[in-house]
């Protein structure tokens, strides 16, 4: 998609993503993977180098994805000194829900958006020896514990409450997200636009 930009030479067509990035708005959409996580890191580094004080809007609409890629995004947000306001626009499932919940400078959700939490999933069919399968299970339990700790930290819920909420695919509407501590407030487009 293109945006029309007026310049001294007339009008230029620029990708809408570039225009939004110049307005300090970043999107995480679709599957979260290593490529998207690195792209997110590059965009944050660029915006911080341009102005370390001015806030950044992060809009999330994703069904989740790779755990390690999500942890890279999480670590970037947590260690960034520049304020990052996070908005759920549509859906934030699985790892995307954790990213929305981890905001420290405002976590927002549009009225008809939703988050979904669940236990970590194995991303492929398991093959191997009994010892290999036991090792995979132990690793999965460590990841589950790490994710539950992160959610507990950012929601104010204890780990037993988080454990109960992640035993199955647990969908939260906007009001339930606020009540559970996954977001701070339900907002409209005007809040996103105020930048």
Image (cartoon, rainbow, N blue to C red):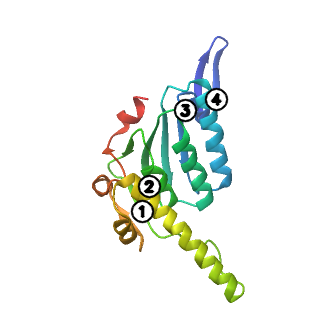
* Residue mark closest to the camera, 3 vs 4: 3
Q: At numbered mark 3, what does the secondary structure look like: helix, strand or loop?
A: helix
Between discs 3 and 4, the one toward the N terminus: 4
Q: Are marks 1 and 4 in contact (CB under 8 Å)?
A: no
Q: Report which quarter residue 127 is drawn in.
A: bottom right
Label 1 belongs to which residue? 116
Label 4 belongs to which residue? 14
Q: Report which quarter residue 31 is drawn in.
A: bottom right
Q: Residues within 10 Å of mark 1 (few under 14, many from 20)?
A: many
Between discs 3 and 1, the one toward the N terminus: 3
Q: Are marks 1 and 2 in contact (CB under 8 Å)?
A: yes
Between discs 1 and 4, the one toward the N terminus: 4
Estimate the spatial distance between the alpha carbons at disc 2 and disc 4, rounded to whole Å. Answer: 27 Å
Q: At numbered mark 4, what does the secondary structure look like: helix, strand or loop?
A: strand
Q: Identify the residue at image location x=59%, y=17%.
A: 6
As rendered, which of 147 and 25 lies closer to the eye?
147
Q: Identify the residue at image location x=53%, y=59%.
A: 64
Q: At numbered mark 1, what does the secondary structure look like: helix, strand or loop?
A: strand
Between discs 3 and 2, the one toward the N terminus: 3
* Residue mark closest to the camera, 2 vs 4: 2
Q: Residues within 10 Å of mark 3 (few under 14, many from 20)?
A: some
* Residue mark closest to the camera, 1 vs 4: 1
* Residue mark closest to the camera, 3 vs 1: 1
């Amino acid at each position: 998609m293109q945006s029309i930009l007026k310049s001294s030479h007339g009008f230029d067509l620029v990708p809408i993503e570039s225009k939004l990035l110049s307005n300090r708005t970043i999107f995480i959409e679709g599957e979260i993977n290593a490529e998207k996580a690195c792209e997110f890191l590059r965009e944050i580094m660029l915006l911080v180098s341009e102005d370390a004080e001015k806030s950044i809007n992060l809009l999330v609409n994703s069904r989740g994805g790779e755990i390690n890629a999500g942890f890279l995004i999480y670590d970037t947000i947590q260690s960034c000194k520049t304020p990052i306001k996070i908005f759920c626009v549509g859906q934030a499932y699985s790892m995307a829900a954790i990213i929305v919940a981890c905001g420290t400078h405002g976590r927002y959700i549009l009225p008809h958006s939703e988050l979904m939490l669940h236990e970590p999933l194995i991303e492929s069919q398991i093959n191997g020896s009994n010892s290999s399968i036991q090792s995979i299970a132990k690793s999965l339990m460590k990841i589950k514990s790490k994710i539950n700790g992160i959610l507990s930290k950012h929601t104010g819920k204890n780990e037993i409450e988080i454990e109960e909420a992640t035993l199955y695919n647990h969908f939260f509407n906007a009001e339930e997200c606020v009540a559970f501590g996954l977001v701070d407030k339900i907002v409209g487009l005007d809040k996103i636009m105020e930048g």
